[in-house]
Amino acid sequence: MADPMKIRASFKDGGVDLRILMAHEMETGQRKDPAGKVVPAWHIQEVVAAVNGKPVIKAHWGPAISKNPFLRARIKAAKIGDKITVTWVDNKGDKRVDETTVA
Amino acid sequence: MNTCSTRVGADVVDSSRRLAMQATSSLGLFSALVSIGMLTPGTAAAQAFNNAAFQAKGIVDTMKALGAAGAIESKDVIITASDIAENGAVVPVGIRSALPKTEMLALIVEKNPNGLAGAYDILDGADAEVQMNIKMGQSSDIVALVKADGKFFIARKEIKVTLGGCGG
């Protein structure tokens, strides 16, 4: 399984500032290895952030998102103490779920 | 490693020729082909999203694939990014919509091999604002596409890249 995400969820200005850092190679599928073979694309396809189990934002990604992706979003419907769960799924079906509490 | 401009198809031809010459593992080529073909299925259950949009090239085709042909420019779609990106592998871009009932945000890079970088469904509870890091193969226009109340709006910005982003 992939390395854990780093998630920060801080309450400010009446909403939650959510910052997520994921550990993923995000291979584009354009690159060749030294033997000249195409390195197959390997990237996160979907990221879902949920507040207390209810999804609020869903990201669909292609390979053009940078390696070790960063995502920042604002969630107005969350407050201190709410549980934020973030799930990502990549194009090989690998998956990672992490959660944090709004501070 | 200068594969930025080459398309996947050309790469496959190239690698098959090379493999034939070297007569090494044809299994490697096979698995490469499978994985190219398998970009979308397999995990399709995890993604009910429009995969054609991620295969499209350029802004016009990508917008067509998203059903957003004829989107109009709007001042309420805001792109936050610097004019010059020093490193094309990591270009921070923020997009925001001030339009009511924003349902979706998407970012398209005109000169990337595939235009669509990411699309975001804004569900009930989130603000219409995201920030991400993208890869850019070369200097290009980027377009933020917003779907609000069933209609599409765009904003455009040019970003100059001083170092290519494909090498990773």
Image (tube, coloured by chain):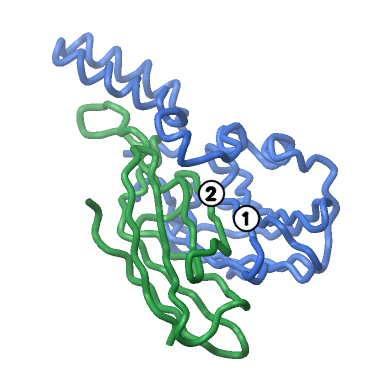
Chain colours: A green, B blue
Extreme residue in the front direction: A53
Position of residue B164 measured from the top left corner of the image (x, y, whole percent):
44, 51
Residue to which mark 1 is pinned: B121
Position of residue B148 measured from the top left corner of the image (x, y, whole percent):
79, 58
The Cα–Cα distance between marks 1 and 2, rounded to whole angstroms, is 8 Å
Residue at 64% across / 61% down in the picture?
A: B123
Residue at 15% across / 10% down in the picture?
A: B23
SS class, disc 1: strand
The chain carrying label 1 is B
SS class, disc 2: strand
Comparing A59 with B18, the one in front is: A59
* Residue type at tag 2: His
Q: Is residue A75 above or below residue A23?
A: below
The chain carrying label 2 is A
Asked where in the image residue B9 lies, by quadrant, the reply is: top left
Residue to which mark 2 is pinned: A60
Left or right of B104 on screen, residue A58? left
Residue at 63% across / 49% down in the picture?
A: B108
Question: Are the residues at dot 1 and dot 2 in contact (C-beta closer than 8 Å)?
Answer: yes
